[in-house]
Image (spheres, rainbow, N blue to C red):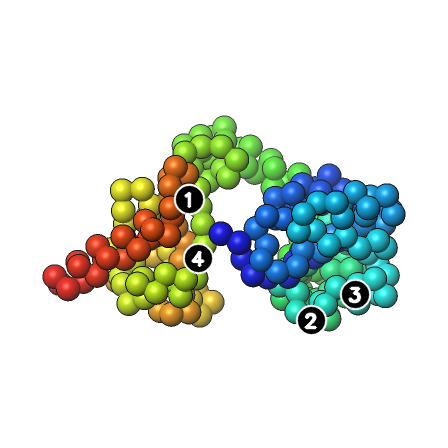
Amino acid sequence: MSAKMNVVIAGYSTFSWELVAQLKDQIGGRLYFVLPDHDQAMEAGTQENVIAVCGEITDTDVLDQLDLEHCHTFVAGSREDQANVLSALYAKNQGAQHVYARIFEVKFSGLLESVGVEPIQTSHTAAAFMAVSILKPGVAELVSLTRGQFDLEEIQASDCAELIGCRLGNLQGEQLHIIAVAQSGNTFLSYNTLVEPDSRLILIYNKRIQKRLYKELHQVALWARQRLNCT
């Protein structure tokens, strides 16, 4: 399910290219990819749903082309700490909602966090997941998005109106489970949590039902309402 949001990936690196590849079919809004080299930008521009921009990620004239005021997520993902920090700080100042900066030196973490920018240390993240794979293989199998039987998804409750007013504890089916409700900046796990119109629902489901996921959600909502009427 594609999300309607504008996203900016800034900077050249293997990480940035892979992130664009993962997002390009999932973004309902604009997906910008800022690259310093003309040939790189030309290559990126051949990919469907990718808006390639050629320029340095610290050049404010380049960044001002990206509609940062309406940017949902900005990721500075080049190979250079200082460029990532500077571009992330500028994006945050210009109104980007969620801003991330890839860093290799931990000394930048405090500065970034103090202004609401999330530091990314890709080697630490990869190592942490590898540790989970070794120590908790069942958990790793469950949360992995590239292998395994299950997938995780986040949806707006309003996309399946029948879910509104249902209790979280009743939202379970044979092939999917809604495991949490996020609303008003908080995430709830309680059985009795009611789904509100502005709630976001986090669910886990069997990948086999991906194409009919909303049909399964409608059925789960029907069962939940039947249980609600019986209590």
Residue at coordinates 50% horizontally, 39% vertically from top-left?
Answer: 145
Mark 4 and mark 3: Cα distance apart in space: 30 Å
Q: Comparing marks 1 and 4, which lies closer to the viewer?
A: 1
Say if mark 1 contacts mark 3, CB within 8 Å. no
Mark 2 and mark 3: Cα distance apart in space: 11 Å
Q: Comparing marks 1 and 3, which lies closer to the viewer?
A: 1
Which amino acid does the dot numbered 3 rest on? Answer: Gln
> Which residue was labeled with disc 4?
155
Residue nearest the observer in this picture, 173 or 58: 173
The kind of secondary structure element at disc 1 is helix
Residue at coordinates 12% horizontally, 61% vertically from top-left?
Answer: 230
Which amino acid does the dot numbered 2 rest on? Answer: Glu
Residue nearest the observer in this picture, 118 or 227: 227
> Which residue was labeled with disc 1?
211
Return the x and y of residue 157 as percentages of the image width and height: 39, 63
Residue at coordinates 46% horizontally, 35% vertically from top-left?
Answer: 140
> Which residue was labeled with disc 3?
65
In this view of the protein, can residue 161 be seen by the observer?
yes
Mark 1 and mark 4: Cα distance apart in space: 15 Å
Is 183 above or below relative to 139?
A: below
Return the x and y of residue 151 as percentages of the image width and height: 44, 42
Q: Quadrant of residue 124?
A: top right
